[in-house]
Image: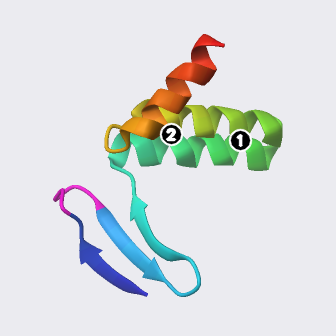
Amino acid sequence: MVVKPAEDEHLRQFTLPMVGTITVPEGPHLAFYVVLVSMGALGVVEWPVVAIVGVGHLLASQTRFPRLQQAGEAVQSA
């Protein structure tokens, strides 16, 4: 595993074999995902809800990928 700074100084990237480069989100976003997964693991929220909320949060927070953001807006308006 190789850790290198991303373009933004607040982001970290990890290169994992057979997976590729993974960018760890900023503090508030990371905390949201940790709490969300913890709630799913404890059975407070069902896993399909965890997946939908997590993907929705990811789409809403994406500013680097305009096409992904447009797809999220299209799904939201549907």
Label 1 amino acid?
Answer: Ala
Looking at this view, is 10 or 45 the one in front? 10
Residue 60, image x, y percentages: 46, 30
Q: Which residue lies furthest to the top in this view?
A: 77
Left/right placement of residue 54 relative to residue 47 reads left
* Residue 58 point in image, percent of width and height: 50, 39
Q: Is residue 71 above or below residue 41?
A: above
Seen from the viewer's position, the closer of residues 76 and 55 is 76
Residue highlighted by disc 1:
51
| Residue shown at 33% from the left, 37% from the top | 63
Q: Residue 58 carries which label?
A: 2
Would residue 2 be found to the left or right of residue 56 on screen?
A: left
Segment tinted magenta in the rendering: 7-11
Which quadrant of the figure contains the C terminus? top right
For marks 1 and 2, give the CA distance.
10 Å
Q: Which amino acid does label 2 sit on?
A: Leu
67 sits left or right of 39 in the view: left
Name the dominant secondary structure of the magenta segment: loop
| Nearer-the-camera pick, 35 or 77 | 77
Tell me where residue 22 sits by quadrant. bottom left
For label 2, the SS is helix
